[in-house]
Image (cartoon, rainbow, N blue to C red):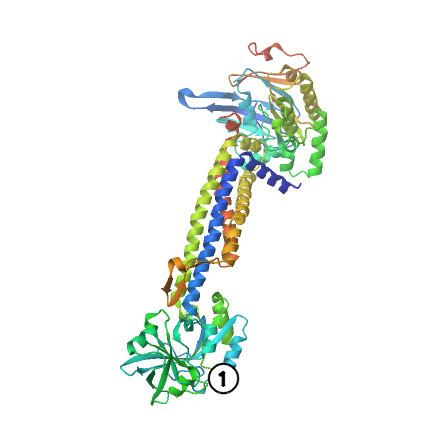
Amino acid sequence: MNDRGFWLRVGWRNLGRHRRRTVITAMALAWGFAAVVLFSGILEGMGSDFIRSGTDLMAGQVRIQHPAYEPEREIWDVIGGDDGVPVAELLSRIRADPEVLGAAPRVYGAGIIASDSTSRGGLLMGIDPERETDVTHFLSGVLEGSPPEEGAYQVLLGQELARQLRTAVGEEVVLVAPSADGAMGNELFTVSGIVRTGIPEVDAAQVVLHIEDLQFLLALGAGDVHEVVVALRNPWDATEVADRLALDLADLASDMEVMAWQEFRPELVEFAGLIGGMNWLILIIVFLMAAFGVANTMLMATFERRREFAVVKALGMRPGRIVAMVVGEALILGILAVLAGALISLPLVLWLMHYPVDLTPIAGEQMFMDGLFRFVLRVEPSWDIPIRSAVGLVVTAVLAALYPALRAIRVPAAEALAGR
Amino acid sequence: MKPQGNGSASSPAVETHELWKTFGEGDTAVHAVQNVSVTIGTGEFVALCGPSGSGKTTLVNLIGGLTDPTRGQVRVDGREVGGMSERERAQLRLDRIGFVFQAYNLLPVLTALENAEFPLMLRGVPRDERRAEVSKLFEHIGLGGLEDRRPGALSGGQQQRVAVARAVLGAPALVLADEPTANLDTQASDALLEVMEVLNRERGVTFIFCTHDPRVMRRARRIIRLVDGHVERDAEKESGELPSWVLDPVET
């Protein structure tokens, strides 16, 4: 037994003098710790789901465009400018990044779509359906029919747009759109399907074509794409992946900008900040309660041991060491609470990590920040929150013991020894 | 007797100069120690006697720096105790003073051995060294085999012996003992007093006892009698016999 072991044993024995009080305090702290770990994990999970739903539907977590494409979205501002870009190589290099799940090219335009009975303005989006499903979810909203096939001159219409055009799957529509060469492109298309994204503006205007058909309509070359949308394994890594891709792809084209969702969806960043703020709020509330609990326990212990503090002062124990003794007891209490809290929270955390509870049947699907959000109770796997909470709890316990410790060193020795 | 100079090897162990300790104020003020000026040389074996409430414990507390004087000065090894910070006083007590309290005051969470070795540990004495010292002394004062018992499992007399062991281990320069034999039988008292006498004789440890016990006073070489907080008599004792003035008629 070295002297450090001695002091630990003394602290342990002192806590054991009022076992019930110690256990009650430690369990209160433990439940607080468990609550922080669990609810913070759920909040993080919800935050991630919000971010995913806000980016997975259409936007992607990383996107590549011509630097001047936004906000005017001019038809000739394609990636790589006048020279375009070798799309196949671009996609191949992007997908070589270990964090990338998929990448899909897109072409955009605006035009008029006319059915037998009426016409409407339409937002034209040319996609590669196979690649698109690796990246976004909006094709899962196809209500009837199917996505457009290559070379078949097919269109997929937003549900509301189809309703307004009074058209249906299998019927023909005419698209007229200004093309890159200054002429007006027009072509007859067949409605291949109806899609519902849940975003009213999109459903009322979206016209989805195969990318090659739209390139042809807009007089663009095969290397002319307006955007490449990238999906990642972890949305929180988007900034690093975007930076990495910008370097990796720099030799393919000069007029190219790689952006993470944090840049092109700043409202999602604010939302992520809100989640972080709520986590801190929970942390502060629980730790304030912990601080009062520990301070109360240690104050009572200090008051009960006035005579003992007088004795150790008389024996020559320096004030700093008395403080260390009291604080050490709080430290042990805090560590016990963290261990107990971990035991309480671990099964719940693991369960919600591996078996999320889908609350959609109760809460329904909600549109949130241009994403279709499903309420799923799940814990985002992360060491950050448990470690931060554990350290925070132990530090709180130690800080809360400082006042009782200062009271201990101010015990008037002679009076306390005389029982006054 | 006025204290002189700063601490040095030749300084008296303890000096008090016109020392007062008053509790309360105004009409309710109680002068526990009144104008006490004494000098106790290094290596003295002194008994403070007097009736209960005469100020013996308060005087010992003042000497040990456990309470501040209302007026006057206390010097230990030539160093003014009143002007010291809490930390300096703690260091002085740790380095120079051993305490035996009236009510044992062992730490209940420590074993007998841990209680006894506590000041040595605070001084940084290596574990093996301090354990050897404790074991030797415990054997001598009849505590052998009780090392691992907590105070609650010891009799009053055994606890008092542990308290004395705690005070004398490491041979501090000064031991302040408040009724050290109050709960001991004759045999145990004699064993303890013997230990203290040996320390006093061989290592020059200064002992100041507050006591009503004639056995302690017989061994003391100087007796100071306090009455109502002031020194009534202060005399060297030449033989083992007790002078009649040390005994309080009510208490004997």
Residue farthest front in this picture: A170
Q: Can see residue A413? A: yes
- Residue pointed to by mark 1: A86
Image position of A153 with respect to A259: above or below: below
Q: Please state the chain letter of the residue tagged with numbered disc 1 in the rendered image.
A: A
Residue A237 in the image, given as x and y percentages of width and height:
49, 67
Q: Nearer the viewer, residue A165 or A17?
A: A165
Residue farthest left in this picture: A117
- Count every numbered label the image shows and give the total: 1
Image position of A235 with respect to B30: above or below: below
The quadrant the N terminus of chain A occupies is: top right
Q: Nearer the viewer, residue A212 or B210?
A: A212
Residue A235 in the image, given as x and y percentages of width and height:
47, 67
- Horizontal side, residue B191 vs residue B52: left or right: right
Q: Can see residue A250? A: no
Query: What residue appears at the point 51 percent right and 55 percent down from the top-left corner?
Result: A351
Residue B126 in the image, given as x and y percentages of width and height:
69, 39
Residue A180, quarter of the rendered image: bottom left
Q: Amino acid at mark 1?
A: Pro
- Horizontal side, residue B141 vs residue A11: left or right: right
Residue A16 in the image, given as x and y percentages of width and height:
56, 36
Q: Classify mark 1: helix, strand or loop.
A: loop
